[in-house]
């Protein structure tokens, strides 16, 4: 929940964690080769497991219905339709990932979806053209995200509380803007974006938008200094600050990006439903956090990859589609999702404890001084 | 966070002046604001003080307050329970189903409901302490799992007041010396929990684990057991709140009590319990619940749009936590200055 734990104890690792070592992302030192190796070995564990799960779910889906993999992105309960149905959540998960990696969380994204949709609807009804409306909507998202970020960094409040507050606040603003009415019949440009394919291909526009954002986030998080700084902040805020990372600005910026992306997701949702209501997006935060955690990102911060999160998007979509084909209603799908969330965290924990045990037996080392406390980061 | 708590505590004892006094008694400040607000609303809309309205407002607030006391026990240990609304919904529905289908006496059904709440809290506790899943993830998961179980039990049906035995909802309107029964219950829960937190070993251990887990472990507190017990007790109180919820409304859907987690956590936070653990009182949380209930009702009797409610809740949460942070920073600054002199 918060990241202000004392320096993480590492039972399986006898060397103390130096500030330098904790700065390098997945590897042990700052040298690029071991960094890449670290990335690969991380991928070899969680992402491969996810891929295996995805393969199993797709296989099961094929058993249930031969149309499971049919390339039809709409109007059927198959995999493709399920993928295009999760695009707004998937987009938000991309922006949530760096926030969770720095040890924060943004619970307000679902309300920002509602607020941006409400602003979109009201301005469109007022007669403004889309080229004016969309930048304004995205601007509202940035402002909302900045507000979250500034409350967290300037006042030193836990992100959980601040975004719990804005979760209610932004939903309330959406209610105030749109009331109980709804706006529909958006122009064809918007509905084409929501329903149409990229000309000449079978790829929906929304999937294309997600893929572009996914590439951008992967590149920024894993190939640039910005991503390096995000991981550094997540591992150890103080060490990051002493090595020159502007921690507060970085965290604020990540919240602003999350707000921007949530506003964009609001537009995607509006275009997919061809209607906006003040309660658009209610309950989506759960799914966003689920995707991020399922993607192997440590909820305590410091660890995770964007490719893992992208894989999690497709795994979840495949699972939803398989469940729907099997005739499971949406309430029970939520149970499956909740179970998946818990198991995706429990499994690596058990594997880790097992590894610690094997280590201990092999080296005859003493037990650690004490058991970790619940919620403590144990890597 | 440990240093923050230490600073806050010493600031409370040393820093004088208005700010210090304000920081010292969050409960009193909140109570004062609450009374002023109530007086203003009563001036504007006299039917606010009608006995019907008072009973319904305070009864609902009492239910939220009981759940908020349970949530406080958990938040004091630096954990959180997002699944409390689903626990309440499941308990309320299961109790109603028991009464409808099995012919068992009401007190037995209520006891089973409270036991179910405790069991659900233990499930959370096991996931968090045995499997070491962070509480926010674990309870986000059980939030939808427990709700799904309610849908499973409901199986597409709802339960109306006439499915239930006669007199089931009577307790909601019952008063003793003009005080609603639920309020008496809530006061009892707050008193017991407050005294236990202050004077028992377990109570002090909850604060210790929440304010500095490492130090708590060093002096021999078994923090995992403590956290587990906090979740079990929190679940039990959510169970009590669920039983009362059923009695209050009499008509139950599979989605009953949806969205109440936010109200409950808001009450806790507004009541001055630090989400970072280790500081705050259950009394504050209960007053917070009453305060939020009053605001919701004020909108109602002043004929203001209900859509504003969430906005006001959000603003109140943010205002409460940011004034806390600002006061804390000021006292910290003042202390630093006095040290230089």
Image (cartoon, coloured by chain):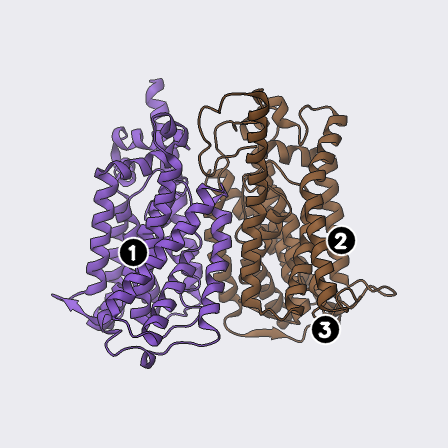
Query: Mark 3, residues whose alpha carbon is within 10 Å: few (<14), some, or many (≥20)?
Result: few
Left or right: residue B270 versus residue A21 is left
The numbered disc on residue A75 is: 3
Alpha carbon separation for disc pair 1 and 3: 46 Å
Quadrant the C terminus of chain B occupies: top left
Left or right: residue A349 versus residue A200 is left
Alpha carbon separation for disc pair 1 and 2: 47 Å
**Are tags 3 and 2 found on a single chain?**
yes
**Are tags 1 and 3 found on a single chain?**
no
Residue B96, percent across and down?
34, 71
Position of A368 relative to A120 (above/below): above
Disc 3 element: loop
Chain hosting mark 3: A
- Which quarter of the figure has residue B19? top left
Q: Nearer the viewer, mark 1 or mark 2?
A: 1
| Residue at the outermost right position | A200
Q: Which residue bears the numbered disc 2?
A: A211
Alpha carbon separation for disc pair 3 and 2: 22 Å
Chain hosting mark 2: A
**Rendering colour (chain B):** purple
Residue A366, percent across and down?
50, 21
Left or right: residue B105 versus residue A128 is left
Chain in brown colour: A
Position of A296 relative to A329 (above/below): above
Residue A299 appears in the figure: yes
Residue A171, percent across and down?
50, 61
The numbered disc on residue A162 is: none
Left or right: residue A93 versus residue B19 is right
Chain hosting mark 1: B
The numbered disc on residue B66 is: 1
């Amino acid at each position: 929940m918060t990241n202000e734990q004392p320096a993480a104890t590492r039972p399986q690792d006898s060397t103390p964690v130096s500030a330098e070592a904790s700065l390098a992302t997945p590897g042990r030192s700052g040298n690029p080769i071991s960094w890449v190796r670290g990335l690969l070995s991380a991928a070899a564990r969680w992402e491969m497991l996810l891929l295996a799960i995805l393969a199993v779910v797709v296989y099961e889906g094929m058993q249930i219905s031969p149309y499971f993999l049919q390339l039809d992105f709409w109007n059927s309960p198959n995999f493709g339709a399920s993928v295009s149905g999760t695009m707004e959540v998937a987009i938000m998960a991309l922006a949530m990932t760096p926030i969770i990696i720095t040890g924060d969380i943004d619970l307000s994204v679902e309300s920002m979806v509602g607020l941006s949709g409400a602003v979109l609807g009201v301005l469109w009804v007022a007669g403004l053209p889309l080229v004016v409306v969309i930048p304004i909507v995205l601007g509202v998202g940035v402002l909302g995200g900045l507000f979250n970020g500034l409350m967290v960094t300037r006042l030193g409040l836990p992100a959980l509380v601040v975004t719990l507050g804005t979760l209610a606040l932004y939903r309330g603003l959406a209610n105030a803007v749109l009331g109980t009415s709804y706006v529909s019949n958006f122009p064809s440009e918007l509905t084409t974006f929501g329903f149409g394919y990229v000309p000449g291909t079978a790829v929906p526009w929304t999937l294309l938008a997600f893929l572009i954002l996914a590439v951008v986030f992967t590149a920024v998080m894993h190939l640039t200094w910005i991503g390096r700084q995000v991981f550094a902040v997540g591992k150890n805020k103080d060490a990051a600050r002493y090595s020159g990372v502007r921690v507060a600005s970085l965290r604020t910026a990540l919240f602003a990006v999350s707000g921007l992306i949530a506003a964009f997701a609001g537009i995607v949702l509006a275009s997919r439903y061809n209607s906006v209501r003040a309660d658009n997006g209610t309950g989506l935060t759960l799914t966003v956090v689920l995707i991020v955690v399922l993607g192997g990102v440590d909820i305590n911060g410091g660890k995770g990859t964007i490719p893992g999160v992208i894989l999690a998007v497709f795994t979840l979509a495949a699972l939803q589609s398989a469940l729907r084909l099997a005739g499971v209603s949406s309430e029970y799908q939520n149970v499956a999702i909740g179970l998946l969330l818990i198991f995706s965290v429990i499994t690596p924990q058990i594997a880790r404890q097992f590894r610690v045990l094997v280590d201990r037996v092999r080296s005859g080392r003493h037990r650690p001084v004490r058991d970790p406390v619940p919620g403590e980061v144990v890597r | 966070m440990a240093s923050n708590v230490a600073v806050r505590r010493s600031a409370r004892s040393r820093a004088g002046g208005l700010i210090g006094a304000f920081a010292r008694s969050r409960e009193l400040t909140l109570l004062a604001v609450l009374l002023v607000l109530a007086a203003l609303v009563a001036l504007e809309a006299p039917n606010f003080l009608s006995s019907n309205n008072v009973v319904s407002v305070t009864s609902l607030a009492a239910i939220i307050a009981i759940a908020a006391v349970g949530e406080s026990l958990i938040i004091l240990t630096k954990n959180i329970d997002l699944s409390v609304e689903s626990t309440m919904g499941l308990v309320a529905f299961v109790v109603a189903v028991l009464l409808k289908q099995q012919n068992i006496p009401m007190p037995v059904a209520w006891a089973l409901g409270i036991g179910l709440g405790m069991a659900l809290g233990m499930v959370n506790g096991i996931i968090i302490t045995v499997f070491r899943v962070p509480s926010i993830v674990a309870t986000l998961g059980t939030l939808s799992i427990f709700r799904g179980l309610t849908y499973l039990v409901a199986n597409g049906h709802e339960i109306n007041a006439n499915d239930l035995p006669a007199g089931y909802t009577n307790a909601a309107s019952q008063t003793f010396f003009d005080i609603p029964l639920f309020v008496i219950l809530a006061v009892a829960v707050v008193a017991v929990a407050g005294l236990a937190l202050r004077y028992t070993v377990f109570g002090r251990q909850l604060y210790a684990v929440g304010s500095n887990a490492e130090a708590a472990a060093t002096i021999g507190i078994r923090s995992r057991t403590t956290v587990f017990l906090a979740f079990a007790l929190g679940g039990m109180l959510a169970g009590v709140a669920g039983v009362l919820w059923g009695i209050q409304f009499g008509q139950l859907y599979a989605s009953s009590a949806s969205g109440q987690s936010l109200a409950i956590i808001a009450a806790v936070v507004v009541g001055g319990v630090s989400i970072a653990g280790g500081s705050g009182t259950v009394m504050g949380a209960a007053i917070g619940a009453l305060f939020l209930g009053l605001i919701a009702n004020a909108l109602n009797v002043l004929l203001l749009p209900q859509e504003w409610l969430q906005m006001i809740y959000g603003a109140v949460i943010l205002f409460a936590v940011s004034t806390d942070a600002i006061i804390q920073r000021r006292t910290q600054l003042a202390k630093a200055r006095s040290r230089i002199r």
